[in-house]
Image (tube, helix red, strand yellow):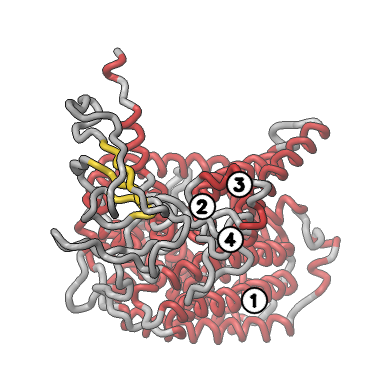
Amino acid sequence: MARWLPRSTDLTRFCQKLNRVKTLEDDMMETSFNRCLSTIDLTLLGIGGMVGSGLYVLTGTVAKEIAGPAVIVSFIIAGFASLLAALCYAEFGARVPRTGSAYMFTYVSVGEIWAFLIGWNVLLEYMIGGAAVARAWSGYLDSIFNHKIKNFTETHVGTWQVPFLARYPDFLAAAILLVATAFISFGAKVSSWLNHVFSTISMGVILFILVMGFVLVQPKNWSAQEGGFAPYGLSGVMAGTATCFYAFVGFDVIAASSEEARNPQRAVPRAIAFSLGLATGAYILVSVVLTLMVPWHTLDPDSALADAFYRRGYAWAGFLVAAGSICAMNTVLLSNLFSLPRIVYAMAEDGLFFRVFARVHPRTQVPVVGIVVFGLLMALLALVFDLEALVQFLSIGTLLAYTFVAASIIVLRFQQQKVDVPAPVAGGRPSPEPHEGPSAGELKEYESFSDKLQLVDRDKSKEHREPGQLKAAFEPYLEFLSDFYPGEVVTVAVVTLMVSAICLCSILVFGNTHLHLPTWSYSLLLVLFSLGFLLSLLLIWAHEQQHGTQTFQIPLVPLSPALSIVLNIYLMLKLSYMTWLRFAVWLLVGLLVYFGYGIWHSKENLREPRPQRVSARYVVFPSGSLEERVQPVQPSSQPAAGLPDTDTGDCKR
């Protein structure tokens, strides 16, 4: 039976396959896409992705059913947590200006399987986002015509009474998605121009809502007679925050579009900062206006803003708001359909998804196959599924992507920068290292005299330390950590930090409600997991990180990404168990796709070096002596015949 068990070497090789990272090209500005987007284009794409159905639909839904007027606080917390995640996206988007967003960022720093799962969830995130916005678009247009479209469909087509499905098929939502798909397929310039038009109209309507709304406010709507400011308490505020994350998904479109930006190193960070700041301010101010215009418990969750103006006697204003909201939702549809095919393209280009989606149209320079296929899938989702169920499912994918991007920032910041050394010419001398030459105390290893030089020991000088090495000030106290390779301790500490964060947030969320822990054990567990989190954070901070890069860097690393990780995990645990169940099913489907296709067709799998026959290895010591270590040339399962274990001698360099 033992022969059927996998050998340890096979398991090690398999784990290495799962955690291999993407090899980036030397010239990351070279692309098959058209680099035509400016900072303004990216900023308007981000605003269009964030200020849409979240403003016109989600605000009313969360205010009425989850948080009450305290939806304002929910948006503030969600905006702060999104800011931490956005800064991580900004650093990655500037350093790795390739399409793929969170998928690409995870692939270059954490590992392949994690990148695939993030990309798989981002696909679902964009599909659900597009379908949810299309249904909201349809509902608003229907409200303009006094629900005649809905009544006609229910009368002539019929209704469904199935959980998670819509009451009736929404043909209008499916139709608008098909029209948007056609426009997106014409190229990035056409998509950007349409987004400019709709974004301008949307921002004009928002200004009108704020000015007109503040004229109509009634402070009594926040009074105790109407339920108070926070009728659902802190739990409602935090649950509302988790749902409000849907509103800030849009800045991801900027990172996904970095391969089409003219100057991504500067444009991506600026566009993310501008768009997120404007969107957060708009959400907070509109929430104030909405909950002060009418009592929060009387809001219409399908068309809250337009209905509020209708009920205050301004029918013309309600009509204007409904028309403007449709324009705003058009921008969200465009941003979702713009981003999704590019992430699919990145996965297909890396070999982790079906290669047909990596085809770029030679004239429009867009992945037209991905646009058409996933546009049809979005239309199908919008046709049959319920908006509320879709929005709840969307949040968990977004939060998971934010968590992995934050962890990737820490790992990448404490990694040594990879420098490609050109291969030596056959029979010639090895190519020189990027630095001047070996310094005192270095240890160099050669496979043979003609092979390239490889560093096998670290620079022990206290004047210069590489990223991932222990800081000189901590070496007397943590000397046992100096034996690890640069970045190894940081990687382990990041894993420990995430495990501690999961345990800490689990106690905070479930300790009193589901686990019914006594006070002493609740407090003890909080202290223990908090200490584990803080110690991991301090251990990361005790190592050197990369400095002096030419691109944007998030401040206060590792503190800022660590706070993002904690907030994201906490908000994920606040989501319903049905959301987690559907999420688990989707992950299982993704694993089947990865192990059935992705792991075998990955480009990194093709790049893996084949075993080479090495008869001797030479280690050059600073003193100038040479030690020869003869190793077996046969596979490990066959003993090397006629070769001694070691043969040590001195010879000239």
| Of pointers 2 and 1, the one earlier in the residue sequence | 1
Q: Is residue 391 visible?
A: no
Instruction: Label 2, secondary structure: give it.
Output: helix
Give the number of the mark in front: 3 or 1.
Answer: 3
Instruction: Label 4, secondary structure: give it.
Output: loop
Which residue is situated farthest in the right direction here? 224
Q: Which mark is residue 462?
A: 4
The x, y position of residue 395, in whole percent, is 53, 55
Residue that carries the numbered disc 3 in the rendered image: 497
Give the number of the mark in front: 2 or 1.
Answer: 2
Residue that carries the numbered disc 1 in the rendered image: 281
The x, y position of residue 71, in whole percent, is 69, 63
Q: Is residue 198 visible?
A: yes
Few, some or many residues within 10 Å of mark 4 (<14, 14–19, 20+)? few
Few, some or many residues within 10 Å of mark 3 (<14, 14–19, 20+)? many
Instruction: Label 1, secondary structure: give it.
Output: helix
Q: Amino acid at mark 1?
A: Gly
Q: Amino acid at mark 2?
A: Leu
Closest to the observer, 501 or 625: 625
The x, y position of residue 359, in whole percent, is 20, 65
On the rendered image, what quadrant is the C terminus found in?
bottom left
The reply to whether dot 2 and dot 4 touch (C-beta < 8 Å) is no
